Amino acid sequence: MRLASTGYTIELPEWVADELADVDEVIDDRVERMRLVHRLADRNWREGNGGPFAALVAETATGRIVSVGVNVVLASGISSAHAEVTALGTAQRAVGTWDLGAAGLPAHELVVNWRPCVQCYGATLWSGVRTLVVAGSGPELEEITTFDEGPMREDWAAQFVARGIEVVDGVLRDEALEVYRAYRAAVDADGLTVYNARTGA
Ligand SMILES: [Zn+2]
């Protein structure tokens, strides 16, 4: 047989570089790191790349931004191209290892505009980050956006902690909901694609 494809790449959209042009390489306040994530998430859906989701990886102690990620499922045609996967992968490329918690590296944190979905829950566990920072974790994301986050465990946060990953919840929560509500309003008005792959299954 002859394979139709032997690989794929997940690329950040070009507008991300423009959006970061006025952003310092170091953002020492965690709240401000989340504010940047919200900004990227809001622009991402408006640009048509994917859902209203963004993430970044930073060095926890210094606040140096190592990578950012946005959801590029629509732009890439790859169902796993969520913001967390994109941010973690580009961070690992930047640092040069699959383990962001490797000996000799500064501790890294993943900052996301909501609790990860079931896929990104696993991706975060395997990434080596020492801290997960989320804007919120309740049912509001699914209720507002109608995205399916999958069968998450009730004890998802405790599972992170049991593996040495601190969880910080509730950072700029209301601002996250504002992004989701704006997205939902556009979906209702314009019929934007909410790309849940299992729709109709
Ligand atoms: Zn995800």
Image (tube, rainbow, N blue to C red):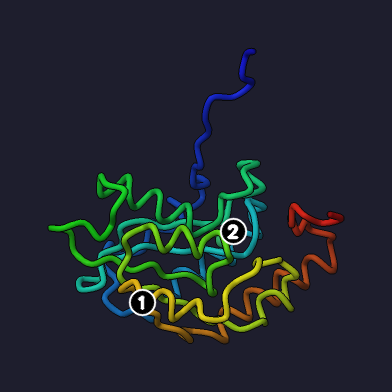
Q: Indicate whether 95 appears above or below 175.
A: above
Q: Disc 2 designates what residue? A: 44
Q: Indicate whether 42 appears above or below 102.
A: below
Name which residue lies at 42% across and 70% down.
Answer: 111
Name which residue lies at 82% across and 56% down.
Answer: 199
Quadrant location, ligand no. 1: bottom right
Secondary structure under the numbered disc 1 in the rendered image: helix
Three-letter residue code for mark 1: Ala
Name which residue lies at 43% across and 56% down.
Answer: 87
The tag on residue 162 is 1
**Residue 40 image point, x, y percent:** 51, 63
Is 27 left or right of 50, judged from the image as shown?
left
The tag on residue 118 is none
Q: Quadrant of the N terminus?
A: top right
Three-letter residue code for mark 2: Asn
Q: Nearer the viewer, residue 88 or 28?
A: 88
- Disc 1 packing (10 Å; few <14; some 14–19; many ≥20): few
**Residue 94 image point, x, y percent:** 29, 47
Give the CA distance from mark 1 to mark 2. 33 Å
